[in-house]
């Protein structure tokens, strides 16, 4: 079952190919450094994890993981730079088979659609308390909490 926020995220994804291309360009341009700072100062560290939902976790699935109200996280300030930094070195259709380090051929994160389509598995491997992706842990607990939050909020392209 999709929440209203998830449905609207889907709608935006469908209508916003240009916005995503722009987000990707942004992320490549500054290597994600500046945008992570923006997300941090935007209140992510306050709202990630416990948030104002009164449900501190740990959660056993993405369905249980709450989306804190007023989450500042979106594709441009968090999602795209996160995946470019931590995941697409192996999980991208642009990576040659011999360079994927064993990442399954059908698990790619080339765009937000693909992330949303695999959100349950992404959460179970990489978000909140889950630490089995990437295989060598390069992701801080704060970033994993932000990933959980962004996914739970429907992986919005643009924060509301
Ligand atoms: C160094 C290469 C590498 C990186 C970087 C990497 N992965 Fe993987 N990934 C793999 C390999 C190898 C497998 C297959 C083995 C396994 O499932 O543990 C895999 C499998 C997966 C799967 C499919 C298995 C399942 O549980 O459904 C998902 C989802 C996944 N990775 C998500 C991610 C996410 C999200 C990131 C970034 C936070 C990431 N991976 C970063 C190599 C990588």
Image: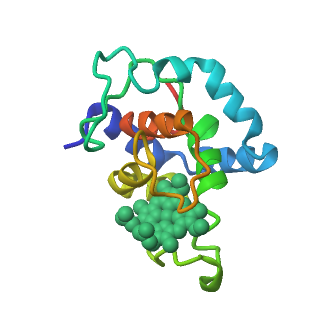
Task: Using the image, determine if residue 78 lies above or below residue 122.
Answer: above
User: In which image quadrant can residue 92 be found?
Assistant: bottom right
- Percent across and percent down for residue 42 are 61, 19
Q: Quick one: which residue is furthest to the bottom in this view? A: 98
Taking the view exactly as shown, the residue that stands out farthest to the right is 29
Image spot of residue 1 (x, y percent): 19, 43
Q: Which residue lies furthest to the left in this view?
A: 1
Residue at (54, 33) in percent of width and height:
142
Q: In this view, does 28 lie above or below 45?
A: below
Asked if residue 19 lies left or right of residue 64, the reply is right
State the residue in front, 108 or 25: 108
Color scheme of the displayed model: rainbow
* Count of marks overlaid on the render: 0
On screen, residue 135 versus residue 98, left or right, reads left
* Residue 137 horizontal/vertical position (percent): 57, 53
Query: Is residue 110 something that shows in the picture?
Result: no
Residue 139 placed where, x, y %? 58, 46
Relative to the observer, which residue lies in front, 77 or 147?
147
Q: Which residue is drawn at 34% across and 32% down?
A: 5
In the foreground, 14 or 139: 139
């Amino acid at each position: 079952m999709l929440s209203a926020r998830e449905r609207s995220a889907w709608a935006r994804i469908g209508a916003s190919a240009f916005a995503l291309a722009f987000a990707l360009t942004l992320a490549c341009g500054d290597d994600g450094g500046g945008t992570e700072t923006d997300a941090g100062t935007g209140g992510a560290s306050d709202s990630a994890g416990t948030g104002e939902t009164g449900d501190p976790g740990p959660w056993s699935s993405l369905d249980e993981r709450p989306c804190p109200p007023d989450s500042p996280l979106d594709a441009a300030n968090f999602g795209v730079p996160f995946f470019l930094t931590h995941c697409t070195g192996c999980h991208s259709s642009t990576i040659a088979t011999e360079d994927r380090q064993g990442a399954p051929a059908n698990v790619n994160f080339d765009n937000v659609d693909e992330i949303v389509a695999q959100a349950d598995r992404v959460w179970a491997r990489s978000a909140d308390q889950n630490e089995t992706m990437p295989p060598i842990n390069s992701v801080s607990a704060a970033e994993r909490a932000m990933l959980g939050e962004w996914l739970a909020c429907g992986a919005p392209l643009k924060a509301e």
